[in-house]
Amino acid sequence: LVILVAEVTAFGLAAAYKDRARTETKNYLQTTITNYYTSSNERNQTDAVTLMWNYMMSELHCCGVDDYRDFALSDKWNESKRDRVVPAACCIQTSLFQPQDKNCPFSPTETNSYFKKGCYTALTDWIMYNRNLVIIVAVAVGLTQLLAIFLAFCLCKSIEKYRGMRL
């Protein structure tokens, strides 16, 4: 019962503060690019933030938070980019981090990259596309918990009824 109440409370808070959550998420994403994103050794990168961004850009077919210009704000990217305009993950790929057009990181266009599509929009679109699945799972879990609570009360009543009997 306590878990169910906590879940309902969490859902209510998420609904009430969704605009603030969107703003904070976008600011956080921008901060991670500005302060942590680097381009050195993209294929074997061990930096978790860079790996996360490369994976997200590759999977969601996007580039930066708003677009490719976000990388101009990153000191680490600017120090290591070697004449590249965008990371390889912003390019249309044949396989993970392998651009279809080898010139894409140096000269991105709308036909060889996703350089004008921001990941914040792509991420919110992905969440909205999958929200029905999330809602269905949440409702199913909630109903299962309610059924378990009901059956527990029934079991308690049955135990009281047979308390005085000997088997």
Image (cartoon, rainbow, N blue to C red):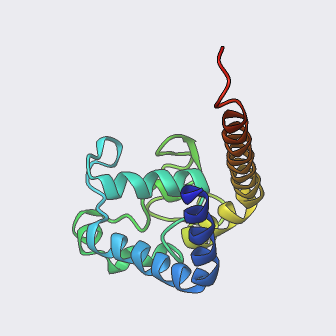
- Quadrant where the N terminus is found in the figure: bottom right
Q: Position of residue 38 (x, y in %)?
A: 28, 62
For residue 103, say whether it is visible. Answer: no
Taking the image as shown, residue 14 lies to the left or right of residue 85, namely right
The residue closer to the viewer here, 11 or 6, is: 6
Q: Position of residue 37 (x, y in %)?
A: 31, 64
Q: Position of residue 141 (x, y in %)?
A: 69, 48
At x 73% / y 58%, what residue is drawn? 135
Count of numbered tags: 0
The residue closer to the viewer here, 149 or 165, is: 165
When asked about the image quadrant of residue 16, the answer is bottom right
For residue 54, say whether it is visible. Answer: yes
At x 27% / y 67%, what residue is drawn? 36
Vertical arrangement, residue 141 with respect to residue 90, above or below: above
Q: Position of residue 100 (x, y in %)?
A: 57, 46
Taking the image as shown, residue 167 lies to the left or right of residue 47, namely right
Q: Spot the residue most to the top.
A: 167
Taking the image as shown, residue 145 lies to the left or right of residue 65, namely right
The residue closer to the viewer here, 149 or 167, is: 167
- Quadrant where the C terminus is found in the figure: top right
At x 31% / y 58%, what residue is drawn? 39
The residue closer to the viewer here, 101 or 1, is: 1
At x 77% / y 53%, what residue is drawn? 136
